[in-house]
Image (cartoon, grey):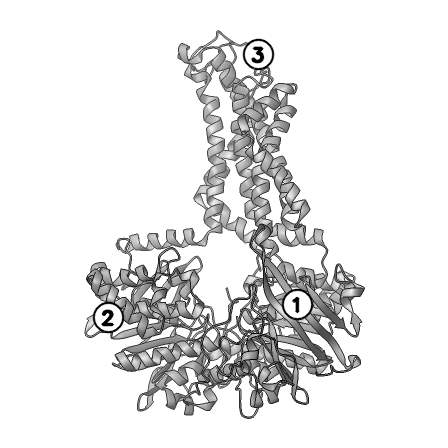
Amino acid sequence: MDPKTKTTPPPLGNEPLQPVPLKNPVSTQLEFFQHLVIQPKAIIGLVILAVFISMAIFAPLIAPGDPSRFVDRPHRPPSSEHWLGTTGQGQDVFVQVVWGARISLFIGFSVGLLTTLLGLIIGMIAGYIPGVIDGLLNMFTNVFLLIPGLPLLITLASFLPPGIITVILVLTATGWAWSARVFRSQTLSLREKDFVSASVVSGENTSRIVFSEILPNMLSLVVSSLFGSVAYAIASDAGLAFLGFENVNNVSWGTMLFWASNNSALLQEAWWTFLPPGLCIALVSFATTMLIYAMDEITNPRLRSEKEISIVLKKFHIGAKRSTPVVKEPIA
Amino acid sequence: MIRLNSESKNILDVRGMTKHFPVGVFARARLVHAVENATFSVQYGQVVALVGESGSGKTTTIRMIARLIPVTQGEIFFEGADILKTEPHRASMDYRSKVQLIFQDPFASLNAVHTIEHHLARPLVIHKKATDRQEIHDRVCELLETVDIKPAAEIARRYPHQLSGGQRQRVAIARALAVDPKLILADEPISMLDVSIRMGILNLISKLKEERGISYVYITHDLASARYIGDQIMVMYAGHLVEGGNSEEIMGSAVHPYTQLLLSAVPDPHAGLRTRKDSGARGEVPSLIDPPPGCPFTARCPRVIDICHQVMPEQTEVTPGHWVRCHLFGL
Amino acid sequence: MRVVYLTMRGPVKAVDGVSFSIKPGEVVGLAGESGSGKSTIAHAILRILHPPALITGGQALFAGLDILEMNDAELEQFRWSNISIVFQSAMNALNPVMRIRDQLMDVMLHHGLSKTEAAERALNLFDLVGIEPQRLDAYPHQLSGGMRQRVVIAIALALNPPMLILDEPTTALDVVVQKDILQQIATLREKLGFSILFITHDLSLLVEFSTHIAIMYAGEIVEKAPARELCDNPLHPYTLGLMNSFPSISGEKHKLTGIPGSPPDLVTPPSGCRFHPRCPKAMPVCSQTAPLTKIISADHSVACHLY
């Protein structure tokens, strides 16, 4: 957009004009986030995530006590004493859900961060340095992409001692390849841009070009990859736990599902033992997906403008048409 | 055979520069002859305009001189030194501080995530032209004022998308100036700008040439701007340099059929409504992949003779300083 | 006519009260830089602007019918048989996965010609624009830039429309090919007799090619005159500035200045005359009221407080 020019006295000769200063020149990244947080989808996503994160942090305040402690008869339905009833082991479901958020979210975000970091390092190096290095890294990435995820997960999980660290390692190992691929191709295309050539001609060294010139241009991609990985991690963690490949003495949403299945919750019609953890997993995935959609909308200007136009057309009662609509009233 | 000017007068001597790109995969790789045997010189404080249509190889030539892409064959002499021998693998910092490049697209050549100040500060820091923050900031404002961007401090804080096309191109020029270059390579710097601001940029380039003695290789497809700003004009076709000389000489007495075709095709509003002479050439630029021997213009040349299909003509002198590669002026 | 683009920053008044007319057989050139609205007007006449664009006022009368009042069905019949358009980049106008023959015949079949009639007409059109008939079976990527542009012209002439809009038809082409194409169009015009609305930023092309020229700036027409008259006697400071932006290839070398500043932001255009921030002859009144269009002499009108 051109800087706003107010009326100024006519210029003498050839002097270029003095533009009026903008209030706060805003970087593209900051502008991006400013637009992001006002999108309805982003707000929904952020609010849900905030709720769950606070739930995890403030667990001792919200649901005091040890979540694996025996409190009442097993499989009691929700009541005023136990808001979500009791499990097949006689534990309070509500307390477990609240405390379980800790492990599930911790695993989710750790894996999200680690896969993104690993994917960035490998992907950007492969993308920027052509030739042998790219070839090798690419092959390495492809190997991990081609191996079916779940069997690999299960295989790794069965070899290693059960525990949170194992889960994080295993999920990172199976999840980094996809984002590495994406970052590599984005780096490849950015490398050809003129501003990178301009940096080379200025004498900039390679690592500064990669981290200071190329990486900031990939911000939206990195963030959406991060959230995608978080959703993937939480769901896969639940899956692994459900199949019994984790330390089932820990309380997480996934292990709750394991125990629910173990205690024949379906047969017992004890829906309160598996519905709450399942819903939590689904909601967190939903929240991260909403955030990714919101980011898509911002980075793709056509989506935005189509939304605006449909608002205006509705206001003037014009149906959607192929030809340019004619509106004979002033637009505010 | 023309004798090249003695080396001490030239800031740049390019000899036999050739670039072939492989295209196609595996064993059937064919070669795109993007630039073939380019030989020319640039004197100190001179603007050499390299004119050609798109695909003629002019951008590739400039990128090789800027050492962004490797040379397939040929020599580059900068200030008398054989650059490809003294720094074969990468350009030295010294070379980068003396030879700069301005790109065609004013928006693409600036990084959207960095402020203007950052763009100008980086070369200053890399080449140790300024060290502490205040000095850097002062130098940045100085540079912006040199390219007629005011108010400098205000614009320095902005991001590229907040500037107009003309301002961005001026920033690109300022960035090139930051290292105190001796030679600036300008790749069609005005073709993506609005018509009314082009002259401002060309005048700036001329002003810098006069005030600082900077030499330029100015690439364009527009003969009129080549004449306006160039001391010398060289014409390129399908990877070959076909004619060159003093710009008034070329505009008035061009002899190569392709140059004549270009001249007749330029619309000239000042000449008013005139019926354009049809120089009789038809067709389009030939493919650069594995080209046949001989002159590339044969398919379109109205005065082609047999030998044109067999052998690429050598450089011949028409008048002192004006050379051409055409069999019509054979030895 | 008024056209508005809805953007996040507010409505952009891309075309703000533009009026002109084209008589049969005339070539009207519309010159302007980026943001002048010239391309927008061309697309608006045919109602092919995409969201977020809206037409917010005016009329577009063609032989007495108002194009802005037509509905979709009427427009489909109207387009191409009455007015057709040659787009800026032939690369984008041609479908890369259809043969040229099919693209050419497509529009004719849609308007009711039979297959044989369409095939015959396709051959005629290729003959008219000077491409060998074997090329009918090619795909667009197999043709050079100049040939593709000729194909686009052939498609535009498929239904023999009385008016042709050329939207920067040669901008993406080399200067030699450009001259060829324009000569071709001129010959066709003599043969078939259509009028042309020629849109470009290159004023030098217009002077050679048009009968009348209108200069646009920031969504408004600032000067209109027959081509020769505009060349000999430019009145508006912007026109003068534009003419001062083209170096010549012959004659004396003068220093040219162009125009300082840059095209305005159309969300909040300058008050009064939109050109006043860049005008070397601006007066106090220029920033207060917008100038009305005054007729200076036969066919020559200008919107400037100097007159």
The residue depicted at 71 percent of the width and 61 percent of the height is: B122
Label 2 Cα neighbours within 10 Å, binned few <14 / some 14-19 / many ≥20: some
Secondary structure found at label 1: strand
Secondary structure found at label 3: loop
Report the residue marked by disc 1.
B18
How far is the residue under mark 2 from the one under mark 1?
53 Å
The residue depicted at 44 percent of the width and 88 percent of the height is: B277
Quadrant where the C terminus of chain C sits is bottom left
Residue A326 showing in the rendered view: no
Q: Which mark is residue C82?
A: 2
Q: Image quarter for residue A123?
A: top right
Q: Chain of mark 3?
A: A
Secondary structure found at label 2: loop
B162 relative position to B273: left or right: right
Comparing marks 3 and 2, which lies closer to the viewer?
A: 2
Report the residue marked by disc 3.
A69
